Amino acid sequence: MLSTIVSKVSAWIGKAIMGVIVLAIIIIGIKSQIIVPWKSPTTPVSYSVLGDDGQMMLVVLLPDNRAIVWYDDDKHDYAEGNLVQWHGYIGTHYIWRIWNIGDNDSTFGSSIFGVRIYPEGVTPVVLDTEVLAHYAGGSETQVLPNKGDRIRNQTVLFGGDAMRFQEMWMKTDDASKVKLDEDISKMLALFGPAKTSQQ
């Protein structure tokens, strides 16, 4: 009799475990098909990093999913910038630090090939970039893409006061809103009429 009870309990535990596994697969499968579009902040936000060699990279997120990507090399008196349009989606969060960012070929949601582990507190965003305008001042080798270039499936991490862009961690710039608005106006003026193509 005891052996019958043990076998029934074992069978029930096996079915319960199998049910949990099937349920987890269904939930992950459904969640992977939900795509949440990324939207830029409604007011400009800037992130920057300054290297020991005097080179600086700045990203200013603008409304309407536009951004200014700016490179400055004081040592060589060189500056370069892109006005870009970003379209993309937020990665799918499962548990802990496990995210799915798609497999770069998937049109309909994520696949198992897009599973990644990211640092605590960050959100991965997969972006497609279109360069609307390009500016270069100086005679150094070009660093940023040309006007009209398109870059697909670039993963950018956002978290708190930081973002990781092109493998560099950048911090939110402490510039006041008035100074940031002035800087944005100056940079947009350098891009010329192309700045209005997506406004």
Image (tube, rainbow, N blue to C red):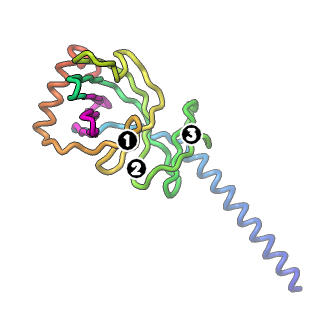
Please tell me whether residue 4 is drawn above or below residue 62 in the rendered image: below
Q: Give me the disc on residue 122.
A: 2
Looking at the rendering, the stretch of residues picked out in magenta corresponds to 44-72
From the top left corner, tell me how far across and down residue 68 is, in percent: 27, 28
Quadrant position of the N terminus in the picture: bottom right
Contact between marks 3 and 2 (CB within 8 A): the answer is no
Report the residue marked by disc 3.
110
What's under tag 3, amino acid-wise? Ser
Image label count = 3
Indicate which disc, 3 or 2, sits on the residue closer to the N terminus.
3
Kindly state the secondary structure of the residue where label 1 is placed: strand
Can residue 157 be seen from the camera position used here? yes
Q: Earlier in the sequence, mark 3 or mark 1?
A: 3
Query: Looking at the rendering, in which quadrant would you find the C terminus?
Result: top left
Residue 177, percent from left and from top: 14, 40
Residue at label 1?
A: 164
Most foreground residue, 135 or 99? 135
- Give the residue type at disc 1: Arg
Separation of marks 1 and 2 at Cα, in angstroms: 9 Å
